[in-house]
Image (spheres, rainbow, N blue to C red):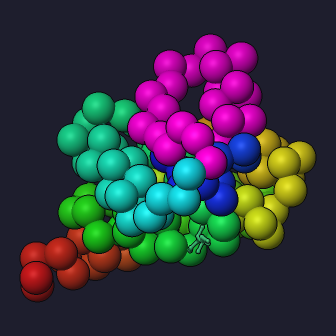
Amino acid sequence: MGSDHAGLALKQLLVEQLEKGGHEVADLGTHDQTPVDYPDFGAAVGRAVAAGEAQLGVGVCGTGIGISIAANKVRGVRAAVVHDVSSARLARAHNDANVVCFGARLTGPVVATQALEAFLATGFEGGRHLRRIAKIDSLEEDD
Ligand code: RB5
């Protein structure tokens, strides 16, 4: 889990939700309201997932956009901004997203918790989507 100051309150709520659900959570910050830069936390979440230290990652900033862009710069990360249960489910089922990002200024806590639940409960469908994920992976080889 990681957030900037704008995502802090929602991140704290999602940490509680995950811990209540029996998940082991690594909270990589930020830990207070002091303004910080979302790329630092997107990178930390992405690196934890890419290194295999976490199965899945969660990022929260004001819109979810900045932290997802930063996380996606880490090789092997597929971070998706989601706004509802459907986008959360499809990010796993079709895109095999390994990081989910929320915009605390755009998505309310009830929808965010339901979306996170859906993200965790959904598996990658594979099949035709495998080829597409492989093409995303191959973009990293072009670097
Ligand atoms: C911080 O003010 C805000 O820009 C950030 O949380 C995020 O929305 C960026 O994408």
**In this view of the protein, which residue sits in the foreground, 134 or 104?**
104
Residue 142 seen = yes
Residue 67 covered by magenta stretch: no
107 on left or right of 89:
right
Residue 70 lies, in percent from the top left, at 38, 68
Relative vertical location of residue 68 with respect to residue 101 in this rendering, above or below:
below
Residue 29 covered by magenta stretch: yes
Quadrant of the image occupied by residue 82: bottom right
Relative vertical location of residue 100 with respect to residue 8 in this rendering, above or below:
below
Residue in view at x 56 percent, y 21 percent: 23
Q: Please provide the residue range marked out in magenta.
A: 11-33
Residue 29 lies, in percent from the top left, at 47, 40
Residue in view at x 54 percent, y 59 percent: 35
Residue in view at x 65 percent, y 59 percent: 6
41 on left or right of 5:
left
Residue 137 lies, in percent from the top left, at 24, 70
Relative vertical location of residue 2 with respect to residue 76 in this rendering, above or below:
above
- Quarter of the image where ligand 1 sits: bottom right
